[in-house]
Amino acid sequence: MELFIDAVSKLYGRRIWGLREFSLTLRPGVLALLGPNGAGKSTLMRILATITRPTEGTVTWQGADGGRPTDIVRSPNTIRAVLGYLPQDFGVYPNLNAVEFLEYIAALKGLGGRAARNRIQELLQVLNLFEIRNRPLGGFSGGMKQRVGIAQALLNDPQLLIVDEPTAGLDPEERVRFRNLLSDLASERIVILSTHIVSDAEAAATRIAVIHQGHLLTSAAPETLMQAVAGKVWQWTVPSTQLEAVRQRYLVSSTARRADGVHLRVVADACPSEGAIPILPTLEDAYLYLLTKADGKDGGSVP
């Protein structure tokens, strides 16, 4: 099973590039797309879901059956049959309950009979929706609707699962449950998770692709990205009166006010002060460092 993205670009209008020469090869596992809002994550996902056509480049799919690779732009139905997709803006029919809605989506996907009903019951249990399955969706909270969206994406047991900002609106317990679900699913399928929440990527992803202004900055395992900033992350305590000046000069990834001053986490190529001590990097440190370098900055506040 493989998804091959080759030099894909998307032009909106005459001047705005949503993606520029994006290339990446995906195999089973969880790929997290990390990037600021407007970086091109949703554009890429819409192309992979065959909703948007690329301006340039190709996307080729080879399924688990080992058949001939297929250009999904020319033959979109090949990948649609094995695709599960949860867009960022997911809508529901407010007068239907969860079971009715999932039965409707299952019918649209060509699923029916006892197998479809059993699958719906299974997903209602896994996603903590079973107790509210008969309530109209119009009365659901944002987090409940998001879980229904996740359920519909999993109905056909997809080989390729694409989820765009899936934890938006979920409470901490639900977020943990969903991240564990993604990890469980990833052994037998390709999962693409788009998010700006670094902790979600860190918890679920086997590989991370960082996107900035439509370009792929890097693609690597989380531990590889963190190793790239080893020796460049510092803990530094400064008086609160110096905080703004430090932010103007260095990349400050976090702050915590304490009785002895402001405890800073600083990402810098060299030690920022005699009082700073090196500490182990996190994925967020690596991510912010990459974005700052891409913007042509050596320091400064968090982008």
Image (spheres, helix red, strand yellow):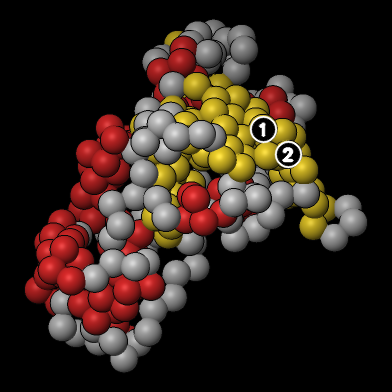
Q: Which of marks 2 and 1 is nearer the N terminus?
A: 1
Q: Give coordinates of residue 188: x percent, y percent.
A: 29, 35
Q: Residues within 10 Å of mark 2 (few under 14, many from 20)?
A: some
Q: Which amino acid does label 1 sit on?
A: Asp
- Residue 143: x percent and y percent? 31, 67
Residue at the image point whose x is 56% and y is 54% from the top: 76
Residue marked by disc 1: 6
Q: Write the residue at 72% across / 33% down.
A: 7
Q: Considering depth in this image, is 60 or 222 the residue closer to the camera?
A: 60
Q: Badges 2 and 1: C-beta atoms under 8 Å apart?
A: yes
| Secondary structure found at label 2 | strand
Residue with the mark numbered 2: 57
Where is residue 290? Give x, y as percent. 61, 26
Residue 177 versus residue 61 in the image, above or below = below
Place of residue 101 in the rendered image (x, y in percent of width and height, measured from the top left): 29, 78
**Can the viewer see residue 244?**
no
User: Of the residues shown, which amino acid type is indicated by label 2?
Assistant: Gly
Q: Residues within 10 Å of mark 1 (few under 14, many from 20)?
A: some
Looking at this rendering, what residue extends furthest in the left direction?
131
What residue do we see at 20% from left, 77% from top? Answer: 99
Count of number-bearing discs: 2
